[in-house]
Image (cartoon, rainbow, N blue to C red):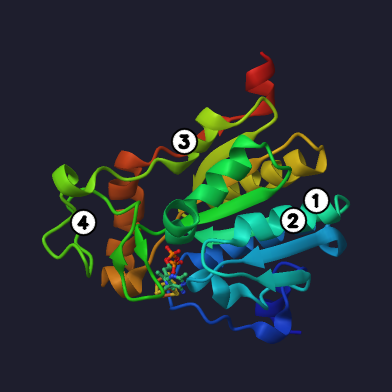
Amino acid sequence: MSVELLRMPKCWRKESKPHKFCPGCGHGDVLKALGEAIDELGIQDRVVFGCDIGCSLLAWDFFDVDSVQTHHGRTTPVMTGIKRARPDRIVVAYMGDGGGYAIGSQHLFNAAARNENVTVILVNNTNYGMTGGQMAPTTLPGQKTETSPYGRDVETMGYPTQGPEAVAAITQDGAYVARGTVANMRQLKGFIKKALQNQMEGNGFSFVEALSGCPTNWRTNARDTWNFIEKEMTKYFKVGEIKTPAQKEG
Ligand SMILES: Cc1ncc(C[n+]2csc(CCOP(=O)(O)OP(=O)(O)O)c2C)c(N)n1
Ligand code: SF4
């Protein structure tokens, strides 16, 4: 076995690698953090992974776990249904910001309000990646996209959706909510691990947004991609834990 394969999380499906994401895409990083979290918790045989339409669908065969690929924006209710039918399983709903905050927002926020015992991981790359870089709910003020060629005008298009903050505001005491970034992989893995543990303990909804890069649609080189994630995105999207069961109890 090569050194590269040995570095992969154990729960990754080796036959589907190299993966299909663009070079420099953050999806692979988020899925690595998820894979390491699953390995460290020793739950590979109990996880069910669900991915959305969007670039997240390229992960349909990413893991050596039971997996399902859903309709655009519908991953949260599909995984909620699986969890209700099989409470012994640990379900992960994986989606982009368009899938979670636009077309699937009613599902995401109602599942959160019901405190469903599922884990949602949402990749925030400030645009609709798969369809060619249109404006998303998370597009930054002034950011140019295919459908905001002069930059997002907050007067007519509003401000970026603060997803984790909104989820934290409507969830009950058991919820776990955090925002990580692919620029800090150790922290991101820690947040995902806590989100999965929250579900394993039966506390209720757990949600991790991950700040991530889309160099193809941003048309950025490696340096500018990381600068955008670390300097521009964090002006609007604060990284850290937003809600934990312990904080609520205290
Ligand atoms: C019901 C429906 N509406 C629209 C589309 C077209 N569509 C496919 S992917 C996508 C956007 C994906 O963006 P996002 O969810 O942010 O994920 P990303 O590709 O950036 O990871 C859209 C609008 C679709 N497949 N189905
Ligand atoms: S289009 Fe963007 S989000 Fe999609 S795989 Fe390429 S870099 Fe990643």
Q: Looking at the image, is mark 4 or mark 3 nearer the viewer?
A: 3
- Spot occupied by residue 46 in the image (x, y as percentages of width and height): 85, 59
**Residue to which mark 1 is pinned:** 84
User: Alpha carbon of mark 1 to alpha carbon of mark 4: how far?
Assistant: 40 Å
What residue did someone put label 4 on? 143
Query: In what element is the residue under mark 1?
Result: helix
Question: Residue 164: which disc?
Answer: none
Which residue is at the front of the view, 108 or 2? 108
196 vs 158, nearest the viewer: 158
Q: Which residue is disc 3 drawn over?
A: 166
Looking at the image, tell me whether mark 3 or mark 2 is earlier in sequence order: 2
Judged from the image, the secondary structure of the residue bearing numbered disc 4 is: loop
The residue that disc 2 covers is 81
Mark 4 touching mark 2, by CB under 8 A?
A: no
How much space separates mark 4 and mark 3, taking CA atoms? 22 Å
Disc tally is: 4
Residue at the image position 48 percent from the left and 50 percent from the top: 105
Tell me if residue 238 can be seen: yes
